[in-house]
Amino acid sequence: MTQDELKALVGQAALKYVVPGEIVGVGTGSTVNKFIDALATMKDQIKGAVSSSEASTVRLKALGIPVFDSNEVESLSVYIDGADEIDHQGHMVKGGGAALTREKIVAAQSKQFVCIADESKLVDALGAFPLPVEVIPMATARVMRQFAAMGASAVVRLKDGQPLVTDNGQHIVDVMGLKITDPVAFESQVSQWPGVVTVGVFAHQKAQVCLLGTSEGVKTLSF
């Protein structure tokens, strides 16, 4: 099966975690787009969604799914999102789509995080995928120097030759050369650096379930 077909498979499989009559947390990215398309088939059974990005909001609304502001919703039964990497404990690296801050906010208000991914995203240790870090622009150079002091290298993510601007008006630094053996401690450490809005390690808001698309079908991992 192609990677695209695997994404569609896990997007469909995630429907069984959606609680009828409730609002569902919806992430961002190409795999989540497949889930949004599948969610449209049961849109009459849910109240709507809380979205983690402008792009997902546009897609949800285009399919007739109401989108609520996260401030209007006290808690969500489930948040369904993809990952750039996920380890065997459910810790993830996220932010390839630059929506990591809003993704972490929606994850924090959800009782269960269901990760949907293809098998290429499952790793023994986080860090092979460049780690996205959302930063306030005036802190960019200093944050990059702090990563250099850890033995890593960092670059500002560009779009059309200019620094990419997130939905929150900030920049993204992508960090290479890391091996994150203690994701909880790493997330706590980098989150304290002045100017860091969000680090793309999801260890405090880790997945409880991962639906992994494999050539043999969908494999369910529980953490």
Image (cartoon, grey):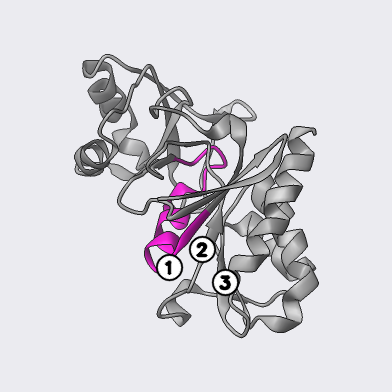
The answer to whether 92 appears left or right of 31 in the picture is: left
User: Mark 3 or mark 2, which has the lower sequence index?
Assistant: 3
Q: Residue 48 in the image: x percent, y percent?
A: 63, 77
Seen in the picture, residue 219 relative to 209 is either above or below; the reply is: above
Q: Which mark is residue 97?
A: none
92 lies left or right of 2: left
Q: Are the residues flagged by discs 1 and 3 in contact, CB closer than 8 Å? A: no
Q: Which residue is mark 3?
A: 24
* Residue 96 inside the magenta-drawn segment: yes
Determine whether the residue tagged by mark 3 lies in a helix, strand or loop. Answer: strand
- Please give the residue where the numbered disc 2 appears in the rendered image: 79
Label 1 sits on residue: 110
Give residue 19's quadrant in the image. bottom right
Q: Residue furthest front?
A: 216
Q: As shown in the figure, which amino acid type bears the numbered disc 3?
A: Val
Secondary element type, mark 2? strand
Could you say where residue 13 lies in the image, as x and y percent from the top left?
Answer: 68, 57
Q: Please say if 137 is above or below 157.
A: below
| Tally of marks | 3
- Of the image marks 2 and 1, the number of the one nearer the N terminus: 2
The CA span between labels 1 and 3 is 9 Å
Quadrant the N terminus occupies: top right
Q: Are marks 2 and 1 in contact (CB under 8 Å)?
A: yes
Query: 10 Å neighbourhood of mark 3: few (<14), some, or many (≥20)?
Result: many
Q: Nearer the viewer, residue 5 or 200?
A: 5
Q: Nearer the viewer, residue 204 or 134?
A: 204
Magenta residues, as a range? 93-114
Going by the numbered disc 2, the residue's amino acid type is: Tyr
The type of residue carrying mark 1 is: Ser
Report how far apart the C-alphas of labels 3 and 2 lie in the structure. Answer: 6 Å
Q: Residue at x 49, y 41 (%)?
A: 95
The furthest residue to the top: 151
